[in-house]
Image (spheres, helix red, strand yellow):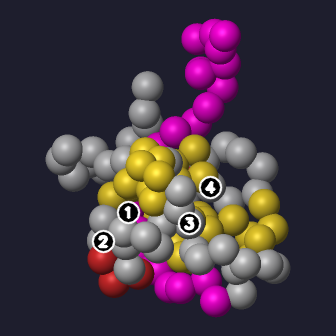
Amino acid sequence: MATIEDFQKLNIRIGTVIHAEIFKEARKPAIKLEIDFGAEVGKKNSSAQITERYTPEQLIGRQVVAVVNFPPMRIAGYKSEVLVLGGVAGENDVILLAPDEVVENGTPIG
């Protein structure tokens, strides 16, 4: 079982997608995201396997929830710095988590 202390180690924030494009080099269909998490965290990149429900155009300007303190991962030469969170409805089918209302970029999740 995870403890509350385990959860508190995660830095989960809300940010706004400012750029999105198809990740052509990825083995599995994915989208490259640039997300603005505000002044404290800054702008971060992510590779997200969310192509079943989303196009890059639909994502720009959308707020998303992400873990911002995992170590960066290299995916087909691309540095993915944050893990965007979503519900997994089925294989390759992710529904992004987002706030009900627009909040300031960098707002922490607790």
Could you tell me if the residues under marks 3 and 1 are in contact, i.e. CB atoms within 8 Å?
no
Question: How many numbered discs sit on the rendered protein?
Answer: 4
Do residues under tags 3 and 2 come within 8 Å of each other at their CB atoms? no
Earlier along the polypeptide chain: callout 4 or callout 3? 3
Task: Give me the residue at 38% from left, 80% from top.
Answer: 55
Specify the segment rendered in magenta: 1-24
Assign a secondary structure to mark 4: loop
15 within the magenta span:
yes
Residue at horizontal 56 percent and vertical 66 percent from the top:
49
Give the number of the disc on residue 61: 2
Alpha carbon of mark 3 to alpha carbon of mark 1: how far?
A: 17 Å
**Amino acid on which the number 4 mark rests in the picture:** Val
Q: Who comes first in sequence, dot 3 or dot 2? A: 3
Q: Amino acid type of disc 2?
A: Gly
The residue mark sitting in front, 3 or 2, is 3
**Are there few (<14), some (14-19), or many (20+) residues within 10 Å of tag 3?**
some
The residue under label 3 is which amino acid type?
Answer: Gln
Indicate whether residue 22 is drawn in magenta. yes
In the displayed orientation, state which residue is furthest to the front.
91
To which residue does mark 3 refer? 49
